[in-house]
Amino acid sequence: DGGITQSPKYLFRKEGQNVTLSCEQNLNHDAMYWYRQDPGQGLRLIYYSQIVNDFQKGDIAEGYSVSREKKESFPLTVTSAQKNPTAFYLCASDPSRGSHNEQFFGPGTRLTVL
Amino acid sequence: AQSVSQHNHHVILSEAASLELGCNYSYGGTVNLFWYVQYPGQHLQLLLKYFSGDPLVKGIKGFEAEFIKSKFSFNLRKPSVQWSDTAEYFCAVNEGRNSGYALNFGKGTSLLVTP
C-alpha cells in the first residue's frame, strides 16, 4: 500500500525539549517537504529536499532542522529554539520531475508543547 | 515571493446551494495552480489542478475551477454542495524551480454544509 506515513499522530513534549517527527514514503518520490499548519494560517513551508543529502530552508525554518539520509525518509526535528512549536505538521512528497507535480500528503502529526 | 489570497475564511451553506470560493495570487509569470481539500480527520488531497490549456478545469466530486489570467484568479466552484463537502479548502500556487516546486498556500476556507 503506497503512501506517506507520519508518526506519531499526537505528540506531547515539555518546553525546552527537542522532538523529532518521522516522515516515510514508499512512492519512490525524489522530493519531500515539511509544512506547518496553524488555524487560519494555511500551510507554511518549513524545509524541502529535492534529492538525498540535500535540503533547503523554506519560509519558516528557524528553530527546525531536517536530514535526508535516505530517499524514503525526511525526519523533522523541532528544537527548543522554535518559539511557538505547538502546531499540526504535514509532510509531503512529489516525483520532482517538474512543476506539474501533485504533492501527496501524509496524515500529519499534532505536536503540543506543554 | 508569491502570495495567495483566499477571500472567505468561513462559509456556511445549505445542501444544494451553489459554492464559489475565491482565490487570487500575486505572481506575474507562468503559474501552476491547485486546489486541495482537507476533510475532517483525513489527509490533505488534491481536488484539481491547472497547468495550461483550457482555463476551466474539472476535478473530483463535481468541483471545477476557472483560471482567469487577467484577474490573477482561480476560483473554485460547485453547482450543488452536499453535506459531505464539509471540509477545509486550500488554494495553492507552485513557486517554481527556485523553491523546489514547493507549494505556496492560501490561508484556507472552512466550509460547513448544513442539512
Image: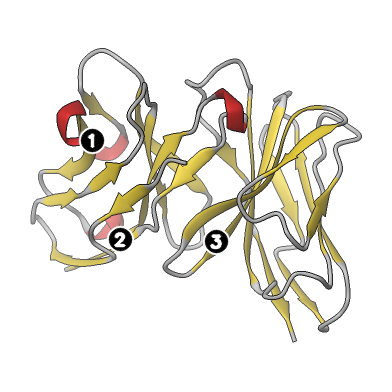
The number of discs equals 3
Q: How far apart are marks 2 and 3 (CA)?
A: 19 Å
- Is B68 above or below relative to A47? above
> Given this view, does label 2 or label 3 mark the residue nearer the observer?
3
Q: Distance between the residues labelled 1 and 3?
A: 25 Å
Crowding near the residue tagged with mark 1, few <14, some 14–19, many ≥20 C-alpha atoms within 10 Å: some
* CB within 8 Å, label 1 to label 3: no
> Given this view, does label 2 or label 1 mark the residue nearer the observer?
1
Q: Nearer the viewer, residue A10 or A100?
A: A100
Q: Can residue B63 be seen in this view?
A: no
Q: Mark 1 points at which residue?
A: B72
Looking at the picture, how far across and down is residue A15, in whole percent? 81, 83
Q: Nearer the viewer, residue A75 or A99?
A: A99
Compared across the picture, whether B107 is left or right of B41 comes to left
Amino acid beneath label 1: Phe
Check if mark 2 and mark 3 are on a common chain.
no
Q: Name the residue under label 3.
A: A37
Mark toward the start of the polypeptide (2 vs 1): 1
Chain bearing tag 1 is B
Q: Is mark 2 on a helix, strand or loop?
A: loop
Q: Name the residue under label 2.
A: B86
User: Where is residue A87, by image quadrant?
Assistant: bottom right
In which quadrant of the rendered image does the C terminus of chain A lie? bottom right
- Is A40 above or below relative to A65? below
- Is B21 above or below relative to A80? above
Looking at the picture, how far across and down is residue B41, in whole percent? 51, 62
* CB within 8 Å, label 2 to label 1: no
